[in-house]
Image (cartoon, coloured by chain):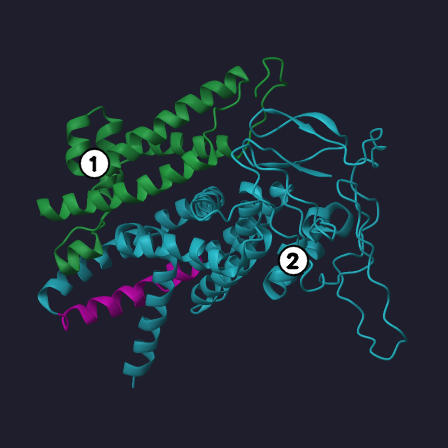
Amino acid sequence: MLARCARCQGTFTTEKFGLQTCPHCGSELMLADPSGGATPPSPPQGPPSTPPPHWMPPPAAPNAGPPPPAPPVPPPGAPSAPPPNWVPPAAGSWPPPPPHLGWGPPPPPPPPSWSELASPFADRKARGFFASYLETFKLVGTQPADFFRRVRIDQAGSALLFGVIGATIGNWASLVFGALTRAATIGQLQARISELPPEAAKFMEQFASTIESLTSPAATLVQMALAPLLSLIGIYLAAGLAHLVLMLFKGAGRGFDATLTVTAYASGLYLVMAVPQCGGIIALVWYLAVLIIGLGEAQRCGPGKSALAVFAPLVLLCLCCCGLVMVGGAGAWGAFQQAAEAAKTTTVP
Amino acid sequence: MTSAASPARRFGHLDVFAAIAALSFLVARFLPVLALPFTCPARGLLGIPCATCGMTHAFVALASGDLAAAVSASPAGALLAAGAWGFALLDLSLLLLGRPFPLPSPGALRLAVAAGVAALLLNWAWLLGRA
């Protein structure tokens, strides 16, 4: 079962009621047995030997007889049985907000009316690495609301691995493409500088110098070597920024694990950066959309607060355009290359 | 409530942020980041500094022990660098000792976030006034 620490709001998995030690902050907390009875038997340890069918889409059989009965709602605190299939929960089944109980520590959230599932990528040992990666990519990209509403948030390691792999491969492809088109891009940029006003021309000359340095073979190799580490750091910083805004507006009820899980899985969509020219823009828009939907579902805070959590740091970065250039450099570089290539094709007779 | 007999602390998310902060110190201290050809777009195109202008200089100066130069380059940058490296030092020390990091309450964290945003805006006003 999932438990949440009243001190640091972090969630963790435990097998028993009673005195617990939070693995995040080390605090001790008492997990009361709602039935008042003895500690229930522990569920079997380890991943299942066969892949569970939970993440499969529901069968489309409109004339196959009466609809199956709804899955039973588990009692509070008890380990819930997994649903028989990948069916979104019914509308209105979200738990009601907890009553205000004064100044004490917040009470643990009520258990969800559906069970949380491991993502296919978290079951990669049973499902196979590539099959589970592709299935998770499909779920994150096409069913983000259902996926993030039900995915377990205590498996951040798998989410981070998924995100780092996608972002790294996307960055590698983008870097190689940038190095291959370096001469044409810089040539087009230099040709346009003469048409600009003096202030803008001076800035563009410096910008061209930066691009020239960053796309040199040595710099490309260094960036490729650092891409996995930078992807991991980027995921953590993006999750941290979003979580700070969510905390500011009291929308981080499920803790940092939920924010990190959503950010990491959404970052896996940066694999699309491997598409030449338009891949960076598509990946950025897709990532932002999935991030907003995912944070709203995983934190149970709704789309308004999640959009605020995603866009407030971006607005702040636009205000602080130094940071915008540093963070969005890859996307801007891709867009510029696209524009330069388009200009090249229109000017060549 | 924290028990002295609690089991050894695991490497968690907080420690990852501490490692990132420690890495920023190593980069600012030992890599020639100021040699990178970079111009702030706001300063280059509009002639005014942005809210984070000077932060790289502040990090590099503070990593070299020059507090006055760091504050002069960007007060918020100097504050951020000092806070991040202090947090990293405290967290990694507690991690080695196996003790939990003293987390503030959610209300205090919210207050700190709001104060951080306000500090960034004040820093921008200071930079604009100086320019």
The answer for which chain carries disc 1 is B
Is A239 on the left-hand or right-hand side of A22? left
Residue under the point 65% across and 58% down? A147
Q: Secondary structure at mark 2?
A: helix
Of A322 and A21, which appears nearest the observer? A21
Amino acid beneath label 1: Pro
The answer for which chain carries disc 2 is A
Amino acid beneath label 2: Phe
Total count of labels: 2
- Image coordinates of residue A319 in percent, x first then y, are 27, 55
Magenta range: A175-196
Q: On the rendered image, what quadrant is the C terminus of chain A found in?
A: bottom left
The label shown at residue B24 is none
Q: CA distance from mark 1 to mark 2?
A: 43 Å
Q: Are marks 1 and 2 in contact (CB under 8 Å)?
A: no
Of A315 and B29, which appears nearest the observer? A315
Q: Which chain is green?
A: B
Q: Which chain is cyan?
A: A
**Do discs 1 and 2 belong to a common subunit?**
no
- Image coordinates of residue B124 in percent, x first then y, are 20, 47
Residue under label 1, please give it: B75
- Image coordinates of residue A296 in percent, x first then y, are 54, 56
Placement of A185 over or under A328, stated as above or below: below
Is A70 on the left-hand or right-hand side of A95? right
Residue under label 2, please give it: A147
- Image coordinates of residue B80 in percent, x first then y, are 30, 35
